[in-house]
Amino acid sequence: MALSHEVASELERILGAGGLVLTPEGRLVYECDMHTFYKGAPDAVALPARAEQVQAIVRVCRAAKVPIVPRGSGTGLIGGAMAPQGGVMVSMNRMASILEVDLPNRCATVQPGLINLWLTNAVRERGWFFAPDPSSQMVSSIGGNVSTNAGGPHCLKYGITTNHVLGLEVVTGHGELVQLGGKTVDRPGYDLTGVTVGSEGTFGLVTAITVRLTHLPEAVKTVLAAFRTVVEASETVSAIIASGMVPAALEMLDEAIISAINAGTGAGYPEGAGAVLLIELDGPSAEVEDQAGRAAAMCRERGALSVSVARDEAERALLWKGRKEAAGAVGRLTAAYLLQDAVVPRSKLPQIMREMVAIGERYRLRIANVFHAGDGNLHPMICYDDRRPDELARAKDANEELLRACIALGGSVTGEHGNGLDKSKNLPLQYAEADLNFMYRLRRVFDPDHLMNPGKLLPTHPACGEGFRPQRPVLPAGTWV
Amino acid sequence: MSPAARALAGALGALVGPAGIGESEAARAAAAVDGRPPRWVVRPRTVDEAAAVVALAHDEGLAVVPRGAGTALGLGVPPERVDVVLDLGGLDAILEHNPEDMTVTVQAGVTGGALAARLAGHRQTLPLDPPGWATRTLGGIAATAASGPVRARYGTMRDLLLGVRFVQADGVITWGGARVVKSVTGYDIPKLLVGSLGTLAVLAELTLRLHPLPDAQATCVVALDGLEEAQALAATVMDSALQPSRLEVLNAGALRASNLPPAAAGVVASFGSVAPAVRAQQAALAGAAARARGRLETLGPGFWKSYDRMLALTGSTVLRIAMPASRLAETLAAAQAAMADVGDVVATACAPLGVVRVGAGQAEAPALADAVQRLRAFVAGDGGSVVVERGPVALRAAVDPWGPVPAAALALMRGLKQEFDPRQTLNPGRFVGGI
């Protein structure tokens, strides 16, 4: 559905010269995020520079019933920042400034298009950082992080994006510019900030974000241990957590990833290792010293093939090198893969890893794993050959089976990537009709016309958007009725 | 009792059993909310029973006030309608503790103390310590978003509630969130319900994130010559790599009430870690205290228990003020000045968050109301808030205990109430903006 001439010219008037992309070549760039499976180019791309423009765009689109899709850096993995129903995509790339750094109050206010790492870069010398660190942090925007409630390797200790968001400025689906939360905590009323983080643009467009800054730790220590099997490594993860430490990060790489990394630039992981565990501890020096020693000892006790402790920043960077290259290294294994983000209770890691091997064998597919072991957040990459349609079909079936296995163990569909178009269909695995109905109604309060990023986050019901029918308690027939 | 009322009583009794319904004068008086006794006190034994009671109340147009331990029933606008006090104290089962996953699922009526006792053997803790936490229910702490000193390190219920089972206003049992420590599937429903004062749903079960108990802990107080000095010392700690578990600033009245050395102001900090790290951090604090000309004293392990008791019992009127941390001393001074006529003011603050708790003695409502208004004028420019956490009914009838909420945000909040409780079944009229 193309935009009407009236809407397009009204948007051009709001955005000024160069603020609206209408050409097919220009729009093509915006047809997908990093989940390139799902394609849908918008009818126009708006490039606002101010919140007032964002509000004006929403009002024009709302009057014309045109869908609105927000976009940050487009690094999402879920089919979120793309426009399956067309409409206007609002790119936040021109709203990328740091508005204020307020160190006495340990916070900063930024525009949504600001690159995650740039905020840390701006405050690191003064001893502070922005804790959420998705692997994409060099390119992903804080607005996008807020939209998907992004996590990262260090959220095991520091929490995910929502734990660091103090306030938002949002243009809701009503076209209202609303301030939610802010520098002061405990505002009376419902926690609208908390419920808006992770709403993937379905409540509105975020135009400013106040985030908490965290003081840099006194010391950081990284331990790398190689194990024969993923199960041994998983058991070590449980032992470390059970011993009362909360490492800053606890990452695991499996055999497929290790050999892919070794075949490339080479982080020099031991040959024959079935799993590599990367343990990072940070905090007061004496604490880090003590815990790193204990963690290394636990790895040895559990039969680690090798244990190395980084002595300085250069060695630490080396230990992380393989982990950071993991996603790229997968390219050596396969032309294409399906990426999952399911979570299982940490204690179920050995069990799910065994199950994953069985699923891989059953579907004759290689499943590579690099994941956040500390919080049970898996990232299986189900490899397939995209020139062979039957492999894709098998990969999809394997993906579904693996997801069901995670949920059966008490897990969750997505730990940090978000729902988008990709995972919304899986929500009924985790939520009953009443739960989904509640979420539909919540969305309606913020977006009565269902124009904000439609088709994302929640599944489409066969009958209609609100077709999920919750069960009320059956009251005994009585004399009071 | 009218025939209709008798029929309703019979129906409620059929849902929860005769022992689960209180209709006697004494039972009703004991459950009065701000002096208003309910028509019935209903105590369900299961979540299904609770849901059935809410469904019936919804259909019959009854107002339901959910209740945990009753600690914070005085929070909010005095109610105009109380038909059913829904006593959730019977939902007191710890359903599942997974020590390896550091998660626990409890029914809403489980108290902080009961959970702590269960977790202690595993050296784990739910780090939530609002005043009187041991006898408060976790459902109540969630509904009121109550917090205490350890939020300086661990955050509040909002950071710890992973999943929640709740009863909607029409009785539908619903689940939101997850049972694992990390999930972004669907909307973050737990955030919506924390602090919602039972106005959107009745909380029935909570899945919570736990933390390890540190190997060693130590607490010390630094006595200082003024509130500015106390704020400055706290700021020094915050702008360092120290990781205090608690960092409280106390005024003279609070030092006195806590049996601490008399001074114009004090900073009380605790550290939890492995023993060498606790010692090192204490030494660092001692150094900072000496540079600030403070007098440091180490406190015994029982201090936080007595501090908790002091907070829980002090003040027939309690205000909670939120301001930027950089204006902490001014805020404490403003609170003391505003409440000067009320007598001894006990003011404490969680320094990193800028949250101040002010307890004051008996006073006439107009004088208290005036103090609240003056403080609201003081905080307005900084986006701060002044909430009456506890206080005489006359005070909370004279001034809105919540204070103003910006119009655009309030419109969304009213939209939520209209969507999820259009018949005004749940705690009607007690929350912000008349919700």
Image (cartoon, rainbow, N blue to C red):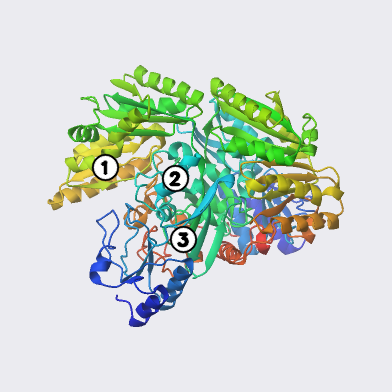
Residue corresponding to mark 1 = A327
Contact (Cβ within 8 Å) of mark 3 with mark 1: no
Which x, y percent locates residue A130? 46, 44
Q: Chain of mark 3?
A: A
Please identify the quarter of the rendering in which residue A7 is found. bottom left
Secondary structure found at label 2: helix
- Report which residue position mark 2 lands on: A120
**Quadrant of image for the C terminus of chain B:** bottom right
Position above or below: A348 against B6: above
Residue A244 shown left or right of residue A422 in the figure = right
Q: Earlier in the sequence, mark 2 or mark 1?
A: 2
Q: CA distance from mark 3 to mark 1?
A: 29 Å
- Labels 2 and 1 share a subunit: yes
Q: Which residue sits at x=47%, y=56%? A: A434
Depth check: A49 or A210 in front?
A: A49
Would residue A165 be found to the left or right of residue A86 on screen?
right
